[in-house]
Amino acid sequence: MRPRAAPFPLLAAIAARTTRIELGTGVIDMRYENPLYMAEEAAATDLISGGRLQLGISRGSPEPALDGAATFGYVPADGEDSADMARRHTELFRYAISGAGIAEANPRQAAGMLPVQPHSPGLSERIWWGAGTRKTAVWAAEQGMNLMSSTLLTEDTGVPFDELQAEQIQMFREAWAAAGHDFEPRISVSRSVIPLGDDQDRQYFALSALRETRDQVGVLDGAMSRFGKGYIGEPDIIASALANDAAVQAADTLMVTVPNQLGVDYNAKLLENIAAHVAPVIGWVRR
């Protein structure tokens, strides 16, 4: 499957055809974004969805392009690096979606500062920051963004991945409480979950079930990093393992990654197996 780099047209199309599911990204690389244009697109999509947009953003990750953001016209200001630029873009984006005035009005037509339109009330509380370390999780809490933590942390202390991620979550909660924000945050963790329910599943993933039984540690973009293990196997076994995953239990949202290259029909079956045989064991209830 080819990568799709423009999330809002797809999300708007899904929003127009659905009524209950949450829609989101995990994550948009803010190095590449025009913050004000993105504010328009995000608000319009959220309005189409009826307030179901959960927007994951981040400072980006290692990529094939040498300096892709510069090709799009975005370069760090003096004294900034690319991460600083992504955070600057994020600050302006979040300011714009709050409904605050951005542009000075033409006095012949209006007064004061004009906001970006459209405005979608509540969207500001549904922005998630993809944090790859404990430090960036604390920063996200201080800024008032929800926490999105994946199957990779770009740091390693020697403890198992789920324990390190649970520590990240605890530090986020403590920083959130200290900041005194006026709403409760959400916290998501991602896991690769593939229950082997039939011969087709075993044909595709039996070898992966043998390989992906433990964390992996390696250097990514110059930093010692820890990758979480996959949850692949018989449904009852992986359900029990997820129930004992410290970070899954500490979070309120579990994001399941699926092998999208196998197509819609296979992934629909896979998700149904997760919903029927795995999710109830870790506390999920079908609505």
Image (cartoon, grey):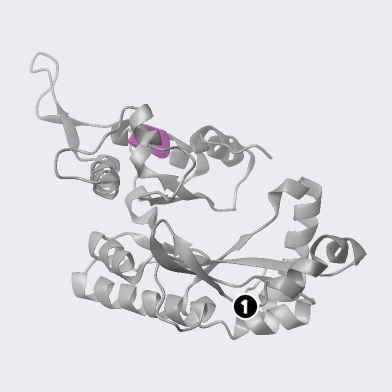
Residue drawn at x 77%, y 75% as measured from the top left:
233
In this orientation, which residue lies closer to the viewer: 29 or 160? Answer: 160
Quadrant of residue 30 in the image?
top left
Q: Which element is circle 1 on?
A: loop
In this orientation, which residue lies closer to the viewer: 243 or 99? Answer: 243
Amino acid identity at mark 1: Arg
Residue drawn at x 38%, y 59% as measured from the top left:
222
Residue 8 x, y percent position in the rendering = 49, 36
Q: Quadrant of the C terminus?
A: bottom right
Answer whether residue 271 is magenta in the image.
no
Q: Is residue 250 left or right of residue 34?
A: right
- Counting the numbered discs, the total is 1
Query: Which residue corresponds to mark 1?
Result: 214
Quadrant of residue 214 in the image?
bottom right
Q: Is residue 31 visible?
A: yes
Residue 31 x, y percent position in the rendering = 34, 41
Question: Vertically, is 211 above or below 49?
Answer: below
> Which residues are drawn in magenta?
39-43
In this orientation, which residue lies closer to the viewer: 286 or 159? Answer: 159
Q: Is residue 131 left or right of residue 270?
A: left
Quadrant of residue 42 in the image?
top left
Residue count near mark 1 (Cα–Cα under 10 Å), binned few <14, some 14–19, many ≥20: some
Residue drawn at x 52%, y 80% as measured from the top left:
249
The prevailing secondary structure element of the residues shown in magenta is helix
Q: Quadrant of the N terminus?
A: top right
Answer whether residue 40 is magenta in the image.
yes
Residue 269 x, y percent position in the rendering = 80, 58
Which residue occupies the extreme top position in the image?
A: 108
In this orientation, which residue lies closer to the viewer: 108 or 189? Answer: 189
Question: Vertically, is 124 above or below 201?
Answer: above
Q: Is residue 131 visible?
A: no
Residue 226 x, y percent position in the rendering = 48, 71
